[in-house]
Image (cartoon, rainbow, N blue to C red):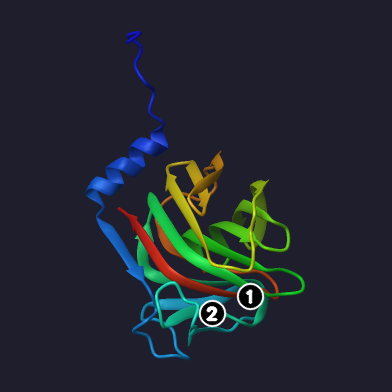
Amino acid sequence: MDGKLRKISPLALAIAMLTATAALAGDEKFDTVAPGTLPADWICGVTGKGSPVWKVEADASAPSKPNVLRQSGTGTFPWCVKQSAQITDGFVEVKFKPLAGREDQAGGLVWRFKDANNYYIARANALENNVSLYHTHNGRRVTIKYVDAPVAKQWHTLRVEFAGKAIKVMLDGMQYITAENDQIAGAGAVGVWTKADSVTAFDDFSYGGQ
């Protein structure tokens, strides 16, 4: 050995600590929810204008059968979050499948969600073949970073890990984005997100933090 200490990133250390001592963790597979309704403690809405339609539906292709959460309406930025999952540092993950959309075919995650106009977003887009990271402040979406990534009309896994101002975004187990941003601090809800006329299915939503 050369005697040098191996550096560990603050994000990796924080996530490792959260994994070992997570004070808040959960998942939602949507399979015990009555079709046509929403899971308990979830609320849905839109940033901007529009009429999003979020509801649990049966889907034969679901990673965990029989149900998925599906958004089939339209809106500037439709969102659906679990209110009680208030997390400052941790992770959020979901499986998603872009189904249709002329303007957009996006599936995303939100965290540190304060209200309809203030939160972080990571999203993957099947029309653009990229993964993007944003923050929304006072209803205005601001790009932090985006990179090319293969996104098809099939099931993908999107995951975000966040600690302090450090953020990592992964698609199908591969890390695509690392960034630092401190625009939205403190605890907030976690959930899922789409854009415009995206028709998107979500399944196997999970989160952990403290």
User: Where 146 falls versus 41 (above or below)?
Assistant: above
What kind of element bears circle 1?
Answer: strand
Q: Is residue 180 visible?
A: no
Q: Is residue 64 visible?
A: yes
Residue found at x 53% / y 59%? 119
User: Where 86 falls versus 45 (above or below)?
Assistant: above
Distance from disc 2 to disc 1, alpha carbons, whole Å, reads 10 Å
Looking at the rendered structure, which numbered label has been put on residue 70? Answer: 2
What kind of element bears circle 2?
Answer: strand
Q: Amino acid at mark 1?
A: Leu
Residue 76 occupies quadrant? bottom right
Residue found at x 55% / y 40%? 179
Where in the figure is residue 44, as x and y percent of width and height? 51, 77
Q: Which residue is mark 1?
A: 99
Residue found at x 48% / y 50%? 173
Q: Amino acid at mark 2?
A: Arg
Residue 120 occupies quadrant? bottom right
**How many discs appear?**
2
State the residue lying farthest toward the right.
102
Where in the figure is residue 113, as x and y percent of width and height? 48, 62
Q: Relative to 98, is 208 on the left or the right?
A: left
- The crowd level at tag 2 (other Cα within 10 Å; few <14, some 14-19, many 20+) is many
Q: Nearer the viewer, residue 8 or 83?
A: 8
Looking at the rendered structure, which numbered label has been put on residue 68? Answer: none
Mark closer to the observer (2, 1): 1
Q: Relative to 190, is 181 on the left or the right?
A: right
User: Where 1 falls versus 35 (above or below)?
Assistant: above
Q: Relative to 181, is 149 on the left or the right?
A: right
Could you tell which of marks 2 and 1 lies nearer the N-terminus?
2
